[in-house]
Image: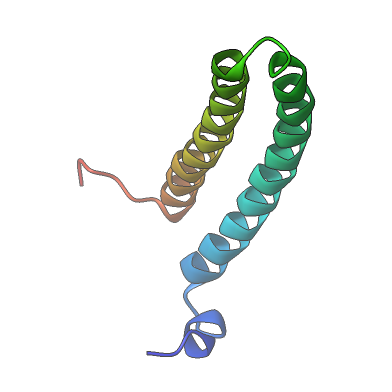
Amino acid sequence: MHILPLLVSSHISFKEGFLSGTVLSAIAGKLGFIVAALSNGRSAEAATKGIQPAFLVGFRGGSVMGLIVVGSAVLGVSAVLMVVGFSIFA
């Protein structure tokens, strides 16, 4: 199955889904770069105290990025379902 027929089809939900996914992915990427840059400096500073503090700072920085990606995915799916008019009670 090719994606191009879906993009030019009359189903607006496909277009909205791809567009919202693109926007949310870009936002998550930008926030990820910011968090990674901040975490990198903090991790280097914590490494002067030992490996464990540096690992904790780096791990928490990665956790924030993971939560941003998952949160944006849930937000995007919810928004697309609301726009399309999907209801679990229908």
Instruction: Please name the residue shown 49% across and 89% down the image.
Output: 5
| Corner quadrant of residue 34 | top right
Instruction: Please name the residue shown 74% across and 30% down the image.
Output: 40
Question: Residue 71 at x, y = what percent?
Answer: 50, 35
Residue placed most toward the observer, 88 or 3: 3
User: From this viewpoint, which residue is outermost toward the top?
Assistant: 49
Q: How is the image coloured?
A: rainbow
Question: Residue 73 at x, y = what percent?
Answer: 48, 45
Instruction: Please name the residue shown 69% across and 52% down the image.
Output: 26
Disc tally is 0
Asked whether, in this view, residue 39 is left or right of residue 25, the answer is: right
Q: Is residue 73 above or below residue 19?
A: above
Q: Is residue 60 above or below residue 27?
A: above
Residue placed most toward the observer, 15 or 21: 21
Asked whether, in this view, residue 18 is left or right of residue 86, the answer is: right
Question: Residue 11 at x, y = what percent?
Answer: 47, 75
